[in-house]
Image: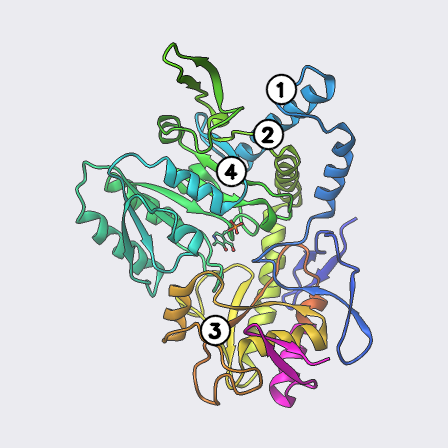
Amino acid sequence: MPVATATAAGQSLRAPLPVLGRDVTVPLVTGGEVTYAALDYAASAPALQRVWDDVAAYAPYYGSVHRGAGHLSQLSTELFEDARRTVAAFLDCREDDQVVFTRSTTDSLNLLAHALPAGCEVFVFETEHHAALLPWRDAKVTCLDAPRSPGQAVRTLERALAGRDAHGPALVCVTGASNVTGELWPVRELAAAAHAHGARIVLDAAQLAPHHPVGVRELDVDWVAFSGHKLYAPFGSGVLAGRADWLRAAGPYLAGGGASRRVTRRADGGVDVEWHDGAARHEAGSPNVIGAHSIASACKALTEAGFDALVAREQHLLRTVRAGLAEVPGVRVLSLFGDDAPRVGVLSFVVEGWNSSHFAAALSAEYGIGVRDGLFCAHPLVRVLLGGAPGTRGECGASGAAPGEESLDAVRVSFGAGTPDEHVTRFLAAVGELVSGGAKWRYRTEDGRCVPVV
Ligand code: PLP
């Protein structure tokens, strides 16, 4: 039976979904132990208990996919192909879309980069995660200025696309939710702008899919990429789903067994290959059936829990965190689109007079709270948000940034379907204590990071 908690508005909210590690305790440098508060979901979310149970139930039946004649091999093949159908349903794909299993979002976007038609132009905002910013090495890339509102994002893209040769192929790559600010991007409007100018669009849903329904048809995007480990399924798989034509026209991403339908030796000693047309074309080698199965399990679990309830609960946590941080003097929450922009449970901030690494180390060592600090693989975006050149940390101690100065990087807190209220309230209490009273322990710099002196 779901346990309900109540918000200030009296609205009833479902309890967090059970995840692994919810009872794990960690030592505090000041003595004693506490249950670990995992507030780094944007990097990797804990596995859903349901995903773990589904993987464990299948594990004894594990067999090779697509190859064997044995019963378990056939069962595993069916499970693998069934996972593809589940992901297609989760994303509301079009009939003729392909779902390719990859290793991660990074892998998915590199696969798409490999499949770009000759002469393809790529348009990408400077605010993207490096996984979306960097794979387009063989294309002509136009990197667009960070917009300061969703409307400005659409206008910037429209202007850039209007200036291109409309006869050649073009691709826009955009995130659904920022991994730094959590802000939602106007994907539907950007897709309409791309299509109006004859371009296609790929959605980096690494941060969106764990928090929101992603409908390929509703958003009218050509491809979607996401990672299992951010979707509560940390078993090494990701997804690229969408239009089949570019994928079919491209050579296989990896050459090898599984991708090839027929291989023959030529009279001149060479080898001729006929490659598969479908998803298998880009899935050479033995597929990660457990990874695919775990993603399908997470898709089902989130769908059954209901995104309405998940979003309501997460927004309740987000409001609590934002209101709490707003009361702490010297804390500045980073934002591109402003306070009222819709966002997911990902939030970065700087603390006046604190080195971010020091702050994050103290949250971990003294309060058992796991957050992230740094530039979050989005260096140009963090540079825009901080209004300066990030990248060099000060020495450890509460002097990384002098009072009144901008910090050189940031602290990120992120949460999701498995986060209990207590993690968020402990985090806010810890931030308040650290800012008002300072760290209780001493820290030193090791390999550029702050660590407690033990
Ligand atoms: N895109 C965004 C928005 C991300 O936040 C991340 C990871 O943090 C990625 C892409 C890359 O994901 P992965 O490391 O799973 O390939």
Q: CA distance from mark 4 to mark 1?
A: 28 Å
Label 3, residues with CA under 10 Å away: few <14, some 14-19, many ≥20: many
Q: Earlier in the sequence, mark 4 or mark 3?
A: 4
Write down the residue under mark 3. Answer: 409
Identified at 75% across, 56% down, the residue is 21
Q: Which residues are magenta?
A: 426-454
For the point 73% across and 80% down, which residue is it?
Answer: 454
- Whichever of labels 3 and 1 marks the residue nearer the N terminus, that label is 1
In the figure, is residue 84 to the left or right of 401?
A: right
At label 2, the amino acid type is Ser
- Residue tagged by mark 2? 286
Disc 2 and disc 4 in contact, CB within 8 angstroms: no
- Find the distance from the CA under tag 2 to the CA under tag 1: 9 Å
435 within the magenta span: yes
280 relative to 428, above or below: above
Q: Residue type at mark 1: give it.
A: Arg
**Ligand 1 closer than 8 Å to label 4 CB:** no
Using a 10 Å C-alpha cutoff, classify the residue at mark 4 as few (fewer than 14 neighbours), some (14 to 19) or many (20 or more).
Answer: many
Left or right: 113 in relation to 28: left
**In the figure, is residue 226 to the left or right of 136?**
right
Q: Are marks 2 and 1 in contact (CB under 8 Å)?
A: yes
Please name the residue that numbered disc 1 is placed on. 67
State the mark number for residue 28: none
Q: Nearer the viewer, mark 2 or mark 4?
A: 2
The residue that label 4 is drawn on is 91
The amino acid type of the residue labelled 4 equals Leu
Q: In the rendered image, is residue 266 in sight?
A: yes
Q: Secondary structure at mark 3?
A: loop
Say if mark 2 contacts mark 3, CB within 8 Å: no
